[in-house]
Amino acid sequence: EAGVAQSPRYKIIEKRQSVAFWCNPISGHATLYWYQQILGQGPKLLIQFQNNGVVDDSQLPKDRFSAERLKGVDSTLKIQPAKLEDSAVYLCASSFRRVPLAGGEKINEQFFGPGTRLTVL
Amino acid sequence: AQTVTQSQPEMSVQEAETVTLSCTYDTSESDYYLFWYKQPPSRQMILVIRQEAYKQQNATENRFSVNFQKAAKSFSLKISDSQLGDAAMYFCAYRSPPSNTGKLIFGQGTTLQVKP
């Protein structure tokens, strides 16, 4: 079974420019998370979707960050305009298959994608 | 609010030896989940081991085991017979109940170096 896919893997932009990241979760996973990981720190949740609805976006800087999950599958995270402090790795994760695979994944586990490393100059 | 603290920014261990990574957390909840994740230079976050707070028995996964002290709010990871492939950043993480979809709260991470 394919894992969580993210693109691009790397992105370099100038400050005040816009950027978008894409995430395709594991098939059947209802919940999707976007985390921001600044260098040397642990990931911090930006936004959580349950199907196509937002569950938690309390730490999303809404003046510049936006996210959507069309049709409850793929998701896009956008930054406009970017600031220097937005340089980080952006991780996407998915979880919660409603009908667990027999002998398969543990229902509570979050599966992470490879992340997108953003550098803002 | 829940917090997770990893007080060891860096640790090193000799190959085949044992190392313990520390983690403490703060919560007022009585039921929750704790995790250790491994993040190699590829950035892929990999689940190493998990512990349900209602279980008294410490979780084990092959060479990895935890020492869960609920009263002390401590959750350390022991890696036995360390291998070169264990070198990575390790994160301790907390998740609230009862939902299966709760966000993870991560510590700052510990970089583990394995010496041949």
Image (cartoon, coloured by chain):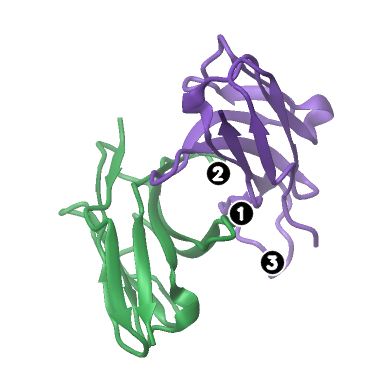
**Foreground residue, B15 or A14?**
A14
Where is residue B52 drawn, in percent x and y?
40, 57
| Circle 3 crowding by C-alpha within 10 Å: few under 14, some 14–19, many from 20 | few
* Three-letter residue code for mark 3: Gly
Chain A's colour is purple
Mark 3, chain letter? A
Residue positioned 55% across, 44% down in the render: B100
Q: Which residue in the structure is indicated by mark 2?
A: B100
Cα distance, mark 2 to mark 3?
16 Å
Q: Quadrant of residue B95?
A: top left
Mark 2, chain letter? B
Mark 1, chain letter? A
Residue positioned 58% across, 50% down in the render: A110
Where is residue A65 drawn, in percent x and y?
60, 18
Where is residue A119 drawn, in percent x and y?
58, 35
Q: Is residue A89 left or right of residue A11?
A: left
Q: Which residue in the structure is indicated by mark 1?
A: A107
Residue positioned 41% across, 45% down in the render: A42
Q: Is residue A78 above or below residue A96?
A: above
For the C terminus of chain B, the quadrant is bottom left
